[in-house]
Image: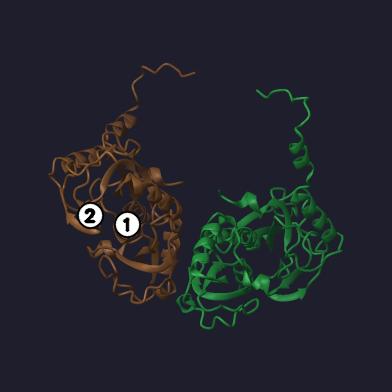
Chain colours: A brown, B green
Amino acid sequence: MSAAPSKRPLPQPVQALAAIPGPEVAARAARLRIRAGEHAGQTAGMAPGIVQGNVAILPADLAGDFLRFCHANPKPCPLLAATQPGDPRVPTLGDGIDLRTDVPRYRVWQDGVLVEEPTDIRDHWRDDLVGFVIGCSFSFEEALVADGLRLRHVEQGRNVSMYRTSIACNTAGRFAGPMVVSMRPFKPSDAIRAIQVTTRFPSVHGAPVHFGDPAQIGIMDIARPDYGDPVEILPGEVPVFWACGVTPQAVVAAVKPPFCITHAPGAMLITDLRNASLAVL
Amino acid sequence: MSAAPSKRPLPQPVQALAAIPGPEVAARAARLRIRAGEHAGQTAGMAPGIVQGNVAILPADLAGDFLRFCHANPKPCPLLAATQPGDPRVPTLGDGIDLRTDVPRYRVWQDGVLVEEPTDIRDHWRDDLVGFVIGCSFSFEEALVADGLRLRHVEQGRNVSMYRTSIACNTAGRFAGPMVVSMRPFKPSDAIRAIQVTTRFPSVHGAPVHFGDPAQIGIMDIARPDYGDPVEILPGEVPVFWACGVTPQAVVAAVKPPFCITHAPGAMLITDLRNASLAVL
């Protein structure tokens, strides 16, 4: 049984809290600007506190295998949502999200060839398309910084270093390939803390998959990442490697499906979910 | 309001569970054997599932500083219980525990000199003595093994390797000194899992304090531990270092108090607490 709502006014401090707009307000405003074509670039730093997602859109005849691939490889491919075929809405991630308009810039692929980079895919939409939204390291990086840890690539204004590894993903139908990892350097004591913090976020890659010797996971030259920028590792630091959301993109690219759409690198879908809501504790 | 107890018989599977003796039964039996002088050696492997503790017994005029030392250094000195002055009971760790008889073998120290190794200290007991019981790595090692991780020193029947480090403990009164750590070698992916598992057990040393390069914490020769036995580190493995309960013993030894009593190495106090009850989640 629920009590009738109290008519008494809230105490002043609670009133003050209620007056602070939540991060969802900024998220929706950012998404509307993106939808209107007013922002067509990277989303890093937009809508602080809010989950951003990698996007892949595939025809239904490939979508089942891709869904199985994500399920079989949850660390590189943490699936936040999959749409109904033909339906561009993602209600579990935010009221009113429309995958046809709400990503700042898309990449349209035909037979593995990049054919267009539009800011809107309403003209490309089909009744058989299934949209996938996959967790992104922005969420756990925010938690690391909030904990007092320093991210060198952020401080140096670079993209994180990413590498193809010798760790094979679990295969699902036509989808197969190596795990891609991102690397962040830390002192060992900070690395231990970073492992603890990211363990709380299994739906955005979770704990690292490796630290230390890059060759153990097939990385032959740490100074030459396969994606992103080189990031310096100082004396006394070790490289720490997390499974990376570039993995599903690389796997889709390798399959060369007749038709698919992804977000352009760094231009992510801004959701209504708070990063904090992804923490398992 | 509590309901009246049901008169209905328990379902059969619950009856079966209720009939299984808990690990506390074996713990109490082991403690009674120790009290009777029937077991005077190491306690490793006795009373599986049960917390064992390091013991230090100090005169009241030093006990305040030692308590502050433990509080200021919770990773090497996780205090499970401290007694009332003169009272050998530790009711929070087990009904009927008597610190004068329930440790298999003691070490009695005078001015820092080991003078006796009795199995019973009733003749040494004084009204001003305060007993301290400090968490021990046996508890988290059990959790590591239960998780499927392998402990080389256990498999090789050796004592864990322990080292004095360049990490200074926080000083409290006369108590000061370096942190002692224990080392277990793991592959990096297993080390990440070991960090997660031991994070759940902050009252028995918790997460590691370091991994990788021993020199970073002042260990100059990993093959020559300061306490315990050398343990092999295989190619592809890294040494992982946890704060160790030998720290408070080494600190007490350095102070050379006029009188104190400790457990003999490896001959721990068996409590009634389950290791699982120390997990924070």
Q: Position of residue B140 (x, y in %)?
A: 61, 60
Q: Position of residue A185 (x, y in %)?
A: 35, 68
Q: Which one is in front, B44 or B248?
A: B44
Q: Position of residue A26 (x, y in %)?
A: 23, 40
Q: Is residue A261 above or below residue B149?
A: above
Quadrant of residue B184 within the rendered picture = bottom right
Q: Residue at x 79, y 54 (%)?
A: B26
Res. B258 mark: none
Q: Which one is in front, A224 or A113?
A: A113
Q: Identify the residue position indicated by label 1 in the image.
A: A252
Q: Chain of mark 1?
A: A
Q: Residue furthest left?
A: A38
Q: Identify the residue position indicated by label 2 in the image.
A: A109
Quadrant of residue A36 within the rendered picture = top left
Q: CA distance from mark 1 to mark 2?
A: 10 Å
Q: Is residue A184 left or right of residue B35?
A: left
The local secondary structure at tag 2 comes to strand
Question: Is mark 1 in CB contact (under 8 Å) with mark 2?
Answer: yes
Mark 2 surroundings: few (<14), some (14-19) or many (≥20) residues within 10 A = some
Q: Residue at x 76, y 32 (%)?
A: B10
Q: Position of residue B68 (x, y in %)?
A: 56, 59
- Kind of residue at badge 2: Trp
**Mark 1 or mark 2, earlier in chain:** 2
Q: Is residue A113 above or below residue B2?
A: below
